Image (tube, rainbow, N blue to C red):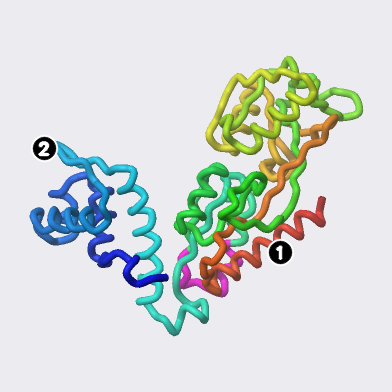
Amino acid sequence: MRPFDIPDIRARELLTVIALSEYGSFVAAAAYLKTSQPALTRTVKRLERVLGVTLFFRNTRRVEITAAGRELVTAAERILGDLEVTARGLSEVPKEQRGRITISTHSAFAGNELPQLVRKFRESRPAIEVRIREGRQTEIVEDVRSGLSDFGIGPIDSLPDTLSSELLLREPLYAVYPTTHPFATKKKGKVRLDDLREEILISGPVDTMLRRLMDGAASNAGISLRYGVTVERLMSILGHVRAGVGIAVVPEGVLPPKPWKEFEATALSEPALTLSFGLITLPGRYLTPAASSMMALVRERARALAHAS
């Protein structure tokens, strides 16, 4: 790190950018920061001059943040968060008594597995705040890449080279269908990829790892799949299946514990497909003892799930 490459930016200026992005108004942001509007304007102009970019577009009615501004807000939240943890007690952070950890993961893990892990974590570290961000793989990757999250938990296939991953488990894909569907009485309890040819499928967005895996397998088999409904979150898929909208293919971890209500699920066969899930980290980023302890709990839970299957 070369000192002359580090921009001269103050913590108060970072807080100004965050406040202005949230309020969208110089008047409201100035009131929140207990400063004057001209002073806030000067702060923003100085930052833009130091960084050489435009952070906000201004007109007489509103303030709109630029792409560069959004990038700075992400960095500012991380920097100020780390600074806050440090200021609250340098001696307490290594003992895991205070601080904050942020985890990014997909909705299924956040809803099915993470609550019990958070409960166990906070039993011995009640003063540490746990923040959980839910999103698709692209959002998890961006959270970790930008430093907004300490680590991510999600699909680890096709990660960018700038991130590191650690395999936790491979989850088989299951065909999920209403209890009234003919698949429920299908002999030998098998659902092949070819059986989905004429079905209306409920799926995540086309850029998700699951969708790419399904489309790739279908293409290799010469099958054209019919997508009828696209949802943003995996957990939303089961609601549409229960309502009889169609059927879906999801990783095993999306399924709630048995007994299932209003739907059945069968491991997909011919071919059997799996998704790799793991920990996603940013190389070189310091992980607090608290974040490392949470990662250890995640590993422990993954081993238990792998053993149970």
In the image shown, does 144 or 254 lie closer to the viewer?
144
In the image shown, does 256 or 218 lie closer to the viewer?
218
Query: Which residue matches tag 2?
Result: 60
Residues rendered magenta in the picture: 118-129
Q: What kind of element bears circle 1?
A: helix
Query: Which residue matches tag 1?
Result: 300
Can residue 247 be seen here? The reply is yes
Question: At 75% across and 48% down in the image, what residue appears?
Answer: 170
Mark 1 nearby-residue class (10 Å; few <14, some 14–19, many ≥20) = few
Ranked by sequence position, the earlier of labels 1 and 2 is: 2
Mark 2 nearby-residue class (10 Å; few <14, some 14–19, many ≥20) = few
Instruction: Choose top left, top right, bottom left or bottom right for residue 191.
Output: top right
Instruction: Choose top left, top right, bottom left or bottom right for residue 59.
Output: top left
Asked if residue 124 is among those painted magenta in the image, a careful observer would answer yes
In the image shown, does 238 or 24 lie closer to the viewer?
24
Question: At 34% across and 59% down in the image, what residue appears?
Answer: 76
